[in-house]
Image (cartoon, rainbow, N blue to C red):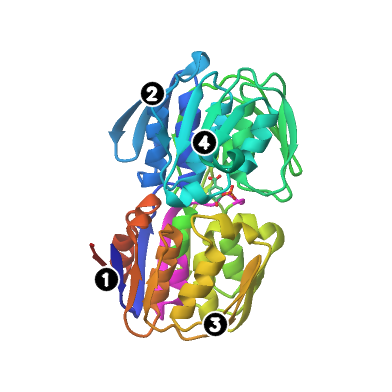
Amino acid sequence: MRFRVRPVARLAGRVEVPGDKSVSHRAALLGALAEGITEVHGYLEADDCLRTLAAVQALGCEVTRKGPGHYRIAGAGPGGPQEPGDVIDCGNSGTTARLLTGVLAGQPFVTVLTGDESLRRRPMGRVTEPLARMGATFVGRANGTKLPLAVRGRRPLAALAYASPVASAQVKSAILLAGLGADGPVSVTEPAPSRDHSERMLRLFGARVGTRGLTVTLTPGGLRGTTVQVPGDISSAAFLLVAGAIVPDARVTVARAGVNPTRTGLLDVLAAMGARVDAPPAAGEPGGEPMADLTIATSELHGAAAGGPLIPRLIDEVPVLAVAACRARGVTTIADAGELRVKESDRIAALARELGRMGVRVAERPDGLAIEGPQALRGARVASGGDHRMAMALAVAGLVADGETVVEDTACVATSFPQFVATINALAGVEAIRVEEG
Ligand code: S3P
């Protein structure tokens, strides 16, 4: 599948984006572990999160779809999940693989996890190493650091105080999930704060979780089923917001977007770049996650520097931020973002290569990139490399390029934002992006 993208002069309207990917995964997993029924509203019905629901079913939990994005999960409770009869395929989803590894570490049976070609390349040692210290056993490729991976869990696991070398919510969450069945408190200390959806949702399900500075501590105990309201995914909204900032005549509102402060780094950088972005205080926190309507209008952007603790707050938004940087006057730098090299693709190399095909000079650095703008984007044939966020960022670049842009390999967009093309076209009022099969 490919996108044929043509430049547009105008974007206008108020749209919603589908449910937050991170929050959806957690709702499925906590619902599966809890005692009683969990109802989830606004669940992201995209490939990654459907993998997590399928995994939960493979572990013996009953999942009922009651309507669009509305699921009822009958939790396994104290008896715990059941040994699955087959390998669990996590597809393209790093969050499914890593959080599930945390869940399985505490179950007294064997599970085998695998994933697609991209996921089988991604590092799992960052979760298996601390979980092995808690008493779980892993056998997998590359000395237990790559999928396919067999997990032999243990109940109870040993308590652990872990200093994580990376600011990764997946690592933190895997340890906290394993900690539910440990014989004492588990704590994770991070080098910088990562997204805190697990902490918030664990509390919603009745767990005892405390945060002090960079350390999160969980006291083992059971979870109670509850109702979860998933906010709109700010990482999907990001593509629309950047498009709204750079298309010549635009005003775009994304309604009911999640604005958890651990996720709003892009809004801060866009504001620092001079974007006319309106992010009012959250309208409320149903289910522990703040939501707000975000509005952006065409802006004269200038360069800005992003690094340090800001990076985990916008890590998934760097591909589209790089597109904004092409249109900004002056230098935009992204530093301390070496993690981008182990996402669905090596996003630093991919951005330098693919934006380069569109005529943009990108300075590639080991842990980030620098772009001096404004630079004209030339319509070109580019490729996502199977990475959903690259596909959508390149499509946004195509909206402001000279001539037609063809983005190859775009089926991956279904992993997080299946409505992306329809949403852009609705805002454009024309078929700005045409999907071609084959
Ligand atoms: C996620 C955490 C981030 C992010 C990913 C989702 C999560 O990964 O990039 O898309 O839901 O916990 P890391 O934890 O590896 O930084």
Which residue has dot 1 on it?
A: 429
- The three-letter code of the residue at mark 3 reads Arg
* Residue 53 pos. (x, y %): 39, 34
Residue ID for mark 3: 361
At 66% from the left edge and 67% from the top edge, which residue is drawn?
A: 366
Mark 1 closeness class: few <14, some 14–19, many ≥20 residues within 10 Å: some
Residue 89 seen in render: yes
Task: Based on the picture, tell me whether residue 249 belongs to the magenta stretch.
Answer: yes
Q: Which residues are magenta?
A: 241-262
Residue 277 or residue 397, whichever sits in front? 397
Looking at the rendered structure, the kind of residue marked 2 is Gly
Q: Position of residue 104 (x, y in %)?
A: 53, 27
Whether residues under marks 1 and 4 lie with C-beta atoms below 8 angstroms apart, the answer is no
First-in-chain label (3 vs 4): 4
Residue located at (42% from left, 70% from top) = 394
Disc 3 vs disc 2: Cβ atoms closer than 8 Å?
A: no
Using the numbered discs, state the Cα–Cα distance from disc 3 to disc 2 in whole angstroms: 51 Å
Q: Secondary structure at mark 1?
A: loop
| Residue density around tag 3, few if under 14, some if 14–19, many if 20 or more, within 10 Å | some
Asked if residue 258 lies in the magenta stretch, the reply is: yes
Q: Quick check: 237 above or below 229?
A: below
Q: Earlier in the sequence, mark 2 or mark 4?
A: 2
Residue topped by disc 2 = 85
Residue type at mark 4? Leu
* Residue 85 higher or lower than 377, as above or below: above
Ligand 1 lies under 8 Å from the Cβ of mark 1: no
